[in-house]
Image (tube, coloured by chain):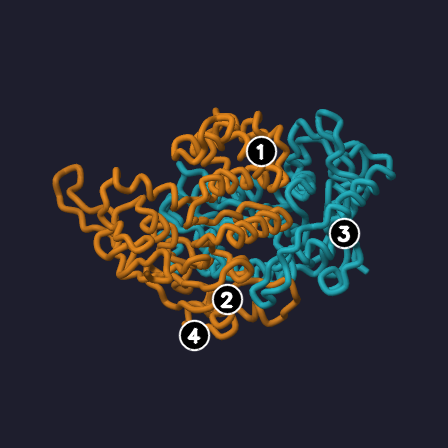
Amino acid sequence: MSNDLLIARDLEVAFGAGASLFGRAKSPVKVLHGVTIQIGRGETVGIVGESGSGKTTLGRALLRLIDVASGTIQFDGLDITRLPEAAMRPIRRRMQLIFQDPMASLNPRHTIRRIVLEPMLFHHVAANEADAEERARKIFARFSLPSACLDRYPHELSGGQRQRVGIARVALLAPDFVLADEIVSGLDVSTQAQVLNLLKGLSRDLGLSMAFISHDLSVVRAVCDRVYVLHSGRIVEEGQCDHVFAAPKDAYTRALLDAIPLPRIDPDWLGATTRTESVGQLDGAK
Amino acid sequence: MNPPVLALSNLSAVSDHDRAILRDVSLEVARGETCGLVGESGAGKSTVAKAILGILPRTVRVTGGEVKFEGADLLKIKAGPLRRLIGERIALIPQDPMTALNPARRIEAQMTDGPRLWRGLDKTAARALALRLLDEVHIRDPDRVLSSFPYELSGGMRQRVLIAAAFALEPRLIVADEPTTALDVTVQKQILRLIRNMQSAHGTSVVFVTHDLGVVAQICDHVTLLFAGRVIEAGSTSQLLDRPAHPYTRALLDACPRYDRPNAGLRPIPESVIADLYAELGQSGATP
């Protein structure tokens, strides 16, 4: 058996295929161009890129939330690329997603109890409601979430608490693979540090494999073992974080790293402006 | 020495539930200088920005202090003249270039409002001014941009338009409220460079609101760090970043992940530091 839990080969994803309203054939827009990635057991892999680079699309394709035009996805030795939904269902529990914005992903009309307990009952992780509640209380204690939170609604919690609930809900299903898509981008640095430390501890204890999608390379450096750099739907660089961050080979990776302002004064960082540079292609100016 | 363009002294404000949201906030911005206003969410940085712009919500009541702009206390000026003064001499670069522009109006209409209203320019002159400003922010095809609707422009382009509009009336002071938070890092760098260059060309003072200490390091001359509406530490950027005096400042720097120092960062702010902060606030007689 392979040492990798998740292997995706030559993934191509296109949007907008099919005829338009008036019957004219629309040409689909290709969003991923032959992307290949592997995620080892217990490994945390970063997927970085700017908006529009295809990182979220790649994540969704890995979880079989969108269909791929071509390529294959293997999960734990099983080809799931075209697996029917019924056959996918037992695998769904094992591959989970933590969303970017818990305010948008937690149902505002449900109590935290219902939000956390329901997936456990649906996937038969817990024998009954009392068992599910017991498990929830245990993990809440570990995540420094007061158990009184269970009776609250999402809007009554702070941003950091909501994100911890999002992580708790996923952790309770004991998945093998977790996709974390920009999960700390809206948080203050102190809350961000808490949430990321929690996630690191969890992946270590449960031996989780994780794909960590982020536009923030400093966060990726702090959390991930290996990193893939995505640009316009192609992987332009991959490798151990130690190597990629110390000596990036690709020009785009270098540009991304150079663009991160570090909290130390660097008079050369902004430099002198030139007209050509400030209307550079990276702006995506139409 | 020149008098500061902006001087806040002991500004205090409460919410409608009499909860303190600003406590004795003082800061000064000299001509051509950039002052960073930093803090985590809820620290009060946006409230300070709104106080300077005269757009505090009705639920916020100022209980003391001064907001002196070019020597005049903005808090003592009546609504009508205040609007004129702020409209003409203080500008805002907003956080979200997606929502700050009216989606139903062309860029030309939105960029020429200010010059026509405050400078009495006619349509042709206002358009000429808009074209010149768009050129100054390095927009390649200003004619096309002027006739565009906001949705036709990328995020970076929209933020350029807003920067151009902010400089239209040659303001003495610009309040930049997290102007790059919604942008990709490569675009952020271009926009920061643009703000800095425009500012030095026009001699404008800037209050730069941000939560990002990395951005502060690159663009601010001095920094004021807020926590729970109180100034925790203020000083030159190098002083604050390289020799932070307050434990909270140090803790905040330790929490920042840095790609150049993989083993530093991600240290949550110790609860003792936060407890001490609230204890300090309690001692000063303010309601925590």
Same subunit under labels 2 and 4? yes
Q: Badge 1: few (under 14), some or many (20 or more) residues near its Cα, within 10 Å? A: some
Q: Is the C-beta separation of discs 2 and 4 under 8 Å? A: no
Figure quadrant of residue B282:
top right
Q: Badge 4: few (under 14), some or many (20 or more) residues near its Cα, within 10 Å? A: some
The colour chain B appears in is cyan
**Marks 3/1: CA–CA distance:** 50 Å
The chain whose colour is orange is A
**Marks 3/2: CA–CA distance:** 34 Å
Mark whose residue sits in front, 1 or 2: 1
Quarter the N terminus of chain A occupies: bottom left
Q: Is the C-beta separation of discs 1 and 4 under 8 Å? A: no
Q: Secondary structure at mark 2?
A: helix
Q: Secondary structure at mark 1?
A: helix
In the rendered image, which residue does mark 1 sit on?
A: A137
Q: Badge 3: few (under 14), some or many (20 or more) residues near its Cα, within 10 Å? A: many
Q: Amino acid at mark 2?
A: Leu
Q: Amino acid at mark 1?
A: Arg
- Pinpoint the chain carrying mark 2: A
Give percent across and percent down for residue B245: 80, 58
Q: Secondary structure at mark 4?
A: loop
Give percent across and percent down for residue B275: 78, 43
Q: Amino acid at mark 3?
A: Glu
In the rendered image, which residue does mark 2 sit on?
A: A257
Q: Is the C-beta separation of discs 3 and 2 under 8 Å? A: no
**Residue drawn 47% across and 44% down?**
A100
Give percent across and percent down for residue A119: 43, 33
Residue A188 relative to residue A112: left or right: right
